[in-house]
Image (tube, rainbow, N blue to C red):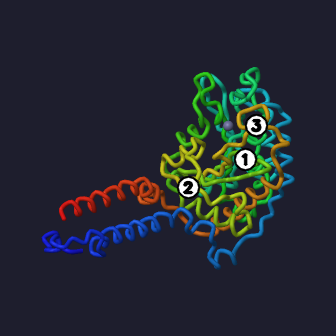
Amino acid sequence: MPPLSDPAPQRIVPESLHQRRPIILSLLSLLLLLTMMIQPITGPAGRVSPAVAAAIHTPLFDGDRAYEHLVQQCDFGPRPPGSENLSLCRQYIVDRLRDQGWTVELQNFTYHEVACSNVIAYWGTRNATLIVGAHYDTRPVADHDPAPENRSRPILGANDGASGTAVILELARILPEDIRSDVEFVLFDAEDSGYYQDWSWIVGSTHYVDVMPSNRRATVRAMVLLDMVGDAELRLPREGCSTRSLQDQIWSIASSLGHDDVFLDTLGATILDDHRPFLDIGIPAVDIIQHNPFPWYWHTLEDTPDKCSADSLSAVGGVVETFLVETAHSETTYPPNSPLSDLPYLGILAAPVFILLVVIVVRRRRTSL
Ligand SMILES: [Zn+2]
């Protein structure tokens, strides 16, 4: 670039190559910047190194059995916190986990004078480094139902409640015994009552984390949350505040198992869900959830078993099973998201400002000529 004091102003060749050079250089830099920014979004996720592909576990997860657990939960009827239906469903969950030899504890707490219980299952001593969670309560009101007369009625929650729980119950049956002590299952109560009366969302998981001893917090390597994973047309974009390194591994396993059509390599939204209290205390966590959009029947009376499928439960269950087997046998840790991981999105916002600055500089140079 010629210096500003260059005698070139004497020449009247406004569109000379010399004058275009700053524009060309700026556009090239912008192109380079955009390339760098876009790469991480669609980059490593979805690809599997040959070493990982060779070591991939063959899932034993049975989608039909998981679907049966989904139907059984719905047979109790709507299951809002504090209800008799939820008590009966809780006992069903406890019994199925104990059938498979897991030690089960109820973590009781009271919220707005309603007795609630998280269900915790572990193998041997309770010091697992991997946590798999789902909520098992259902929303007390169908406030998104198109029919106003239905909006004060409770939902059945086949997808929103029963699906994640169903996957956990089948995982509890098929997990290899040599990794069971690495895994803790948690079924959260009181996730889905936000905005109902004066309730908050994610009450059960918040309580779980509040009472988690500090020495245990330091040892948990990953928390995997399953929520609304049963839809027959299951589509799972990447939830926006999940730990990306952990999410990358799970999406990579999904790809290697042929589930790119379910685990979409697209960025979704950030969701207020049971993984958030874990993230808040520095535990890597990922939310596997259908969203952007939520299923059309979300928080309506139409959230019934016929909208769900064994195939969808099987896809998610097989991926999580493989993740647990691979991770339990490794020393893998998951670095938290850094401000730099948000660079691509900040960059996209910054690009118009950058272009504007280039235009201003070029115009000022022309004026000074
Ligand atoms: Zn919900």
Figure check: 188 above or below 151: below
Residue 20 image point, x, y percent: 31, 71
Please say if the residues under marks 2 and 3 sit with CB atoms less than 8 Å apart. no
- The reply to whether residue 252 is in sight is yes
Residue 163 image point, x, y percent: 76, 45
Residue 107 image point, x, y percent: 64, 38
Residue 157 has which mark?
3
What kind of residue is marked 3? Gly
As helix, strand or loop, the secondary structure at mark 3 comes to loop
| Quadrant occupied by the N terminus | bottom left
Please say if the residues under marks 3 and 1 sit with CB atoms less than 8 Å apart. no
Q: In this view, does 12 lie to the left or right of 206?
A: left
- The reply to whether residue 87 is in sight is no
Is the CB of mark 3 within 8 Å of ligand 1?
A: yes
The residues bearing labels 2 and 3 have C-alpha atoms spaced at a distance of 30 Å
Which residue does the numbered mark 1 point to in the structure image? 164
| Quadrant occupied by the C terminus | bottom left
Sequence-wise, the earlier of marks 2 and 3 is 3
Which residue does the numbered mark 2 point to in the structure image? 220
Q: How crowded is mark 2: few (under 14 residues within 10 Å), some or many (20 or more)?
A: many
Sequence-wise, the earlier of marks 3 and 1 is 3
Residue pictured at 20% horizontal, 74% vertical: 2
Residue pictured at 81% horizontal, 40% vertical: 92
Tag nearer the camera, 3 or 1: 3
Q: Give the image quarter of residue 193.
A: top right
What kind of residue is marked 2? Val
Tag nearer the camera, 2 or 1: 1
